[in-house]
Image (tube, helix red, strand yellow):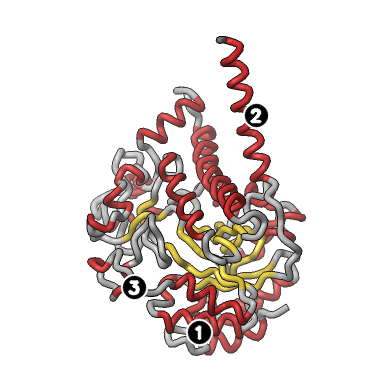
């Protein structure tokens, strides 16, 4: 019996190593030209005509890829069996949550993009689970009501509360959460998409900036503690099981980083099983990879170096720190990883002259390409090219 247990332990260990190695060397597709991408958020559309105009504008402007948002906070903009339809598609009223709008934004985007050769990436917020001061209707099965135990818990022992403009996050440590996210990816892989784009794949370290809405009388110290996650029983048990009771701060940080990376690895593996070799995995990552790794537990450099993502899309939205963050990303990803897998994101809220300078810098940086955030600044709510768009769009092409 003892020998059997030893052999079983060895088999389990070898299987785990093989699984990690398999995902870490995700096969790359054929060599592609430089990426020129645009983010389209779920706030840019609420009708089929909106989607048609958006994709037409993006396709005719010379973009190679579009990150088209289809999941915000546990509600979706595609036909799902796991999460309810977003209420924004049914008149923006919360009681309409889960109501079938009668059309599928993701499918329409894919069909409209084909004549332009535009690659559509299904863009999903990964860990946000709900936003707003009002609870979703119970009958919809939305995560906030259906799975309250999935949400992060702060260092004072309270469940993370969403604000009017900020999300409550689900906990990547919980196995059921990871399984649910894998299910979302499996659903998306049934569509003829070019890729899946992950956003908010990190810990919400910056929650203290908005937590005052929920805790108006809290001190700055308390608000900081409200942004320290997650102290739920599942996380604490897993942490103590891995490191024992005599924990160091470094071990806690490693544990949280590993929990986020594990989700990325799980989703990469799921995609490889569902769409082997022909679907790209990308992730929006913080502009400063050093801060991202230290405070948000997002190890974007590791994801690139291990091949867990095809593209790390750096949200380099800084002004004075833009070049420094670019250098830090080059160092974190490594020279070859930066060249093959880092797409540099530029914030189009900045003034046009600054954006043009940053585009020029990215083009000379030998990165994988560039991405612009976001559609609204270039085309506006009426889908007409804005003044800024007339200046910026001619400069995006190689």
Q: Is residue 392 visible?
A: no
Q: Residue at x 49, y 51 (%)?
A: 202
C-alpha separation, residue under disc 3 versus residue under disc 2: 48 Å
The mark found on residue 92 in the picture is none
Disc 3 marks which residue? 101
Q: Locate residue 15, reporting x and y percent.
A: 62, 32
Q: Residue at x 54, y 59 (%)?
A: 189
Placement of 349 over or under 122, stated as above or below = below
Indicate which disc, 3 or 2, sits on the residue closer to the N terminus.
2
- Relative to 69, 64 lies left or right: right
Q: Residue at x 59, y 21 (%)?
A: 9
| Number of marks in picture | 3
Q: Locate residue 57, reporting x and y percent.
A: 55, 84
Q: Is residue 114 visible?
A: yes
C-alpha separation, residue under disc 3 versus residue under disc 1: 25 Å
Disc 2 marks which residue? 14
Q: Locate residue 205, reporting x and y percent.
A: 44, 50
Viewer-closest of 15 and 311: 15
Placement of 29 over or under 176, stated as above or below = below
Q: Residue at x 73, y 78 (%)?
A: 398
Indicate which disc, 2 or 1, sits on the residue closer to the N terminus.
2
SS at mark 3 in the image: loop
């Amino acid at each position: 019996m003892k020998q059997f247990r030893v052999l079983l332990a060895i088999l389990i260990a070898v299987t785990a190593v093989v699984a990690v190695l398999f995902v870490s060397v995700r096969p790359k597709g054929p060599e592609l030209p430089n990426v020129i991408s645009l983010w389209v958020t779920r706030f840019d559309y609420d009708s089929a005509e909106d989607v048609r105009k958006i994709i037409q504008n993006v396709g005719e402007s010379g973009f190679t890829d579009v990150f088209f948002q289809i999941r915000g906070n546990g509600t979706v903009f595609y036909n799902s069996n796991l999460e309810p339809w977003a209420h924004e598609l049914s008149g923006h009223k919360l009681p309409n949550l889960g109501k079938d709008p009668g059309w599928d934004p993701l499918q329409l985007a894919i069909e409209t993009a084909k004549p332009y050769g535009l690659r559509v990436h299904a863009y999903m917020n990964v860990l946000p689970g709900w936003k707003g001061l009002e609870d979703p209707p119970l009958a919809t099965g939305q995560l906030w009501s259906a799975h309250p135990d999935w949400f992060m818990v702060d260092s004072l022992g309270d469940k993370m509360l969403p604000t009017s403009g900020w999300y409550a996050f689900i906990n990547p440590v919980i196995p059921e959460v990871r399984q649910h996210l894998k299910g979302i990816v499996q659903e998306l892989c049934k569509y003829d998409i070019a890729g899946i784009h992950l956003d908010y794949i990190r810990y919400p370290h910056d929650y203290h900036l908005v937590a005052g809405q929920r805790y108006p009388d809290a001190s700055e110290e308390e608000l900081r503690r409200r942004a320290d996650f997650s102290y739920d029983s599942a996380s604490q048990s897993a942490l103590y099981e891995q490191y024992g009771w005599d924990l160091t701060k470094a071990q806690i940080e490693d544990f949280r980083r590993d929990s986020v990376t594990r989700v990325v690895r799980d989703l990469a593996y799921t995609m490889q099983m569902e769409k082997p070799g022909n679907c790209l995995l990308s992730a929006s990552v913080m502009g400063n990879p050093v801060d991202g790794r230290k405070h948000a537990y997002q190890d974007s450099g590791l994801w690139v170096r291990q091949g867990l993502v095809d593209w790390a899309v750096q949200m380099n939205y800084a002004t004075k720190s833009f070049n420094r963050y670019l250098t830090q990303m080059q160092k974190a990803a490594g020279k070859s990883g930066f060249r093959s897998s880092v797409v540099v994101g530029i914030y189009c809220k900045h003034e046009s002259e600054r954006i043009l300078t940053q585009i020029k810098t990215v083009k000379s940086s030998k990165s994988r390409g560039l991405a612009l955030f976001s559609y609204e600044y270039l085309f506006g709510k009426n889908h007409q090219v804005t003044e800024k768009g007339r200046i910026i769009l001619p400069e995006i092409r190689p």
